[in-house]
Amino acid sequence: MPDLTIPRAESAYSYPLLIKNLLDAPVVSNPDQEIVYRDRMRYSYRTFRERVCRLANALEKLRVKPGDTVAVMDYDSHRYLECFYAVPMLGAVLHTVNVKLSPEQILYTIDHAEDDILLVHADFLPLLAQIRGRIDTVRAMVLLQDEPVSPPEGLEFAGEYEALLAEADRHYEFRDFDENIRATTFYTTGTTGLPKGVYFSQRQLVLHTLGTMAALASAPSQGRFHTGDVYMPITPMFHVHAWGVPYIATSLGVKQVYPGRYAPDVLLDLIEKEGVTFSHCVPTILHMLLNHPDIEKRDLSRWKVLIGGSALPKALCARALELGIDLYSGYGMSETCPVLTLAQVPEAELGSDNELEIRCKTGRPLPLVDLRIVDEQMRDVPADGESVGEIVVRAPWLTQGYLKDQRNSEQLWRGGYLHTGDVACRDAKGYVKITDRIKDVIKIGGEWISSLELEDLLIQHPAVAEVAVIGDPDPKWGERPLALVVPQGELDEKALVTHLKGFIDRGLMSKQALLLKVKLVEQIDKTSVGKINKRLLREKHAGRV
Amino acid sequence: MPDLTIPRAESAYSYPLLIKNLLDAPVVSNPDQEIVYRDRMRYSYRTFRERVCRLANALEKLRVKPGDTVAVMDYDSHRYLECFYAVPMLGAVLHTVNVKLSPEQILYTIDHAEDDILLVHADFLPLLAQIRGRIDTVRAMVLLQDEPVSPPEGLEFAGEYEALLAEADRHYEFRDFDENIRATTFYTTGTTGLPKGVYFSQRQLVLHTLGTMAALASAPSQGRFHTGDVYMPITPMFHVHAWGVPYIATSLGVKQVYPGRYAPDVLLDLIEKEGVTFSHCVPTILHMLLNHPDIEKRDLSRWKVLIGGSALPKALCARALELGIDLYSGYGMSETCPVLTLAQVPEAELGSDNELEIRCKTGRPLPLVDLRIVDEQMRDVPADGESVGEIVVRAPWLTQGYLKDQRNSEQLWRGGYLHTGDVACRDAKGYVKITDRIKDVIKIGGEWISSLELEDLLIQHPAVAEVAVIGDPDPKWGERPLALVVPQGELDEKALVTHLKGFIDRGLMSKQALLLKVKLVEQIDKTSVGKINKRLLREKHAGRV
């Protein structure tokens, strides 16, 4: 085929999608807009750009060059936001260290990402002290602090963040790079194996910013994020760039509030005092805030909250709505930069019986997101609100693999679509609803049955104290459901199948559930955080009944 | 420098920014949403996608292949929207023929663009008849009609649009292309020379769609375009894709109304009957609508209108506001895809004394738009609301040259920025205000003086019947203002300079204006549309006084 690409005048500027280009328009249009860090710091966008330049100069003094990796261990702060820009703008890679991991796992991620420079908040020094002497790649550390601290013995710092910025020049001419260079890296953990590194190019971050901004802003009224809002993240900035929203907030030119370490009192105070109108968090954090003893005294009526990370429980959503909070769901994962869908409520459904349910759905795909729900042969399942399949996606902002892990990269992308491992259905209006993780689905013939739904039904039998359902390999059906039951009183398989039949007869469960096998056990194995350990249960019981 | 681009799993999908990818999400989320063509046609997004597939198959039957050019001569219609998608989705180039040009100019653009296929509305057949036999490149024509017509003798058609679609298959698997292939071409005319072809890649159109959608949607309230709106263009679809808004409207999944040929009655009826809430047009069209005898009887209180193409006069804006229309300005040109800025009113300014003025400004740059106002040495002028310079820009969606015209391409892009030829100032809040075309500016030493402002002041002298001001080359000053004056009664240079001094003393004009030279003339040369012909005046008078 002949070359059909557009001709370019020799002088024409071929515009690359770079992080630096997100910074021009908002600073020009809103130079006096505020960025706030708790009760410690407050400055303008004009100053923000200046500090980004200072940070770039300070990092260059530490010999940071394109392709180097700069790691950050901090709470949500103005400093972190400065790193979001300055590090990629130097052509370097920002490793947002997952500080929730164990010290040994953190050591693993620092080594695996080959971090060159480490910026670390004073609170994490004790953690760092546990792994000192074993960090191989880091050649300089920078101390981040809110008040003066003395580092523990054996930890050497090239300097303190504010001091390094103060002595750095406030001008920097950022150069152009290929838009496909790596900008960020973050490590995600599953229930098994070592942390896996996802990574995003500058182009991907710019496109995620534009696409998600357009989707968040373009709702008719409910749940929209616009230039008049005040933003505060309550998802850690290390976690896929706080879902990318700091880049969006900066591009919108809104007032931004960074809360440091999450403490319910501080968060609630900031929401009221700074007039925060838009946040995002996981259900657990919201639950914690809503259980604060003072909650009824707070005015949260202007607060919009995007929920992600796990399904939004209806009860939590209803409680938030009672308090005047405008709550709704979004969906994504570390591998997807992360946003894929939003569950904004259409104008016509506001106040309807469906409203609560829509807010708790997974949502509808963003522009440019090609989200399919497919069976095992990658055929689309019908959008009938019932048929389930795995969510697979294409979008311009998906990790193109796991860092230095070819096997898992190819597994993630098998068939040219990113496999989310989430099982969902889609209704006629395009709303997706996740029902299971694919590992929790029992595949009986061509049918998929939810192990979670089966557990919900079985626990309702009076003689069942605890239950976990896994798939048991079967030569005829592929899999049959195997219920591991801790009984209370007398119980046999037949009684449970009869119990299930009642639900099947009422159309609440697929009739394949009658293939249920039951094994009585003394206890159900749990993980360290108290979740049922399906992996271990499968190892112990599957194929052995 | 080592290769720092992100690694990609072999199976990973490297997502290109293609027009086809704008179509997935809205059709999935809003399959039943409507697209309306006058009172003639009404169908769903589901049907729209099907018709795009049919059109692609029909064009392939006419042997359209990637790189071919498909030209369209039509009013604003569902057919045009189908071409906006199907033609680039085949890898072909859509030439949106500027039907306002003369038949000879149209012939020139068809030849210059090397059109292969021409889709033409029945109303333009008489025009086509004038140039038949002289069109060299077109190998097949398709007839577009609203009711059955008989083409004039000597014009052969491969078929009628609806008939071709009806017999085409409704499935088409669109393949991937390089995102930098050319998608569209349009010819723009200046006051001099032949029409010049601008062109845009698929990537550029996708990025313009995302960036402009984000900017239009993210205003707090005034002037926003969102998923609950109903859209109708009143800028021709041939004119830089109706400012790109049909792509945005489709991506938002909103109801769309295409009005065919612009007739005030039809437009006003459609606004009311179809509930149109968002449009865009040039001031002249709005003026025509507001002068409709029935205007007071119409309910336009839900109508938002983006004005572009030329400055929005305050009186027109005030009149529109009286009628309840939410009016504001945007800025761009054919070379810029086109949108660069929007003059949405911030929440705090609504209802203030500044509101009207802000709505009539040029606006603030969109995300990713690097808009500078520079002097002749490409140095930024201060953002003080007074200092003027030329607007030069970088953005991801600017034409990379003029088609097959290297000299003008390099001139457009000299110094790596696209030169708009517009002279403007910027205030501290980032609002740009265009004051002149650069050709209308007199450059006296380092100062730029507006010839239009000088003309405004001079015409106020009772002995001046008509006046035009041009720059006269001067060895000391670079240029001095030369006023060509048609006198009424007695008049000399001194009287006019004294007249100007009055304004200078009151701070209304820069004192360089005192360098004014005056030449009395019998008449001022005009162009065919009645504008002062500055080019001719410069040729005749500059350097000859």
Image (cartoon, coloured by chain):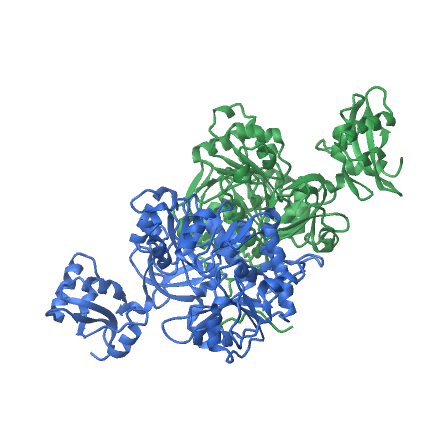
Chain colours: A blue, B green
Q: Can you tell which quarter of the image residue A516 is in?
A: bottom left
Left or right for B377, reference B355: right
- Residue A350 shows up from this direction: yes
Q: How many numbered dots are placed on residues in this image?
A: 0
Q: Tell me: residue A320, above or below residue A60.
A: above
Q: Tell me: residue B457, above or below residue B23.
A: above
Question: At which x and y percent is residue B314?
Answer: 62, 31
In the image, what residue occupies the spot 28% across and 78% down? A539
Viewer-nearest residue: B56 or A73? A73
Question: At which x and y percent is residue B277?
Answer: 47, 37
Q: Tell me: residue A259, above or below residue A101.
A: above
Viewer-nearest residue: A4 or B62? A4
In the image, what residue occupies the spot 59% across and 30% down? B316
Which image quadrant: the C terminus of chain A?
bottom left
Viewer-nearest residue: B447 or B158? B447
In the image, what residue occupies the spot 47% across and 36% down? B276
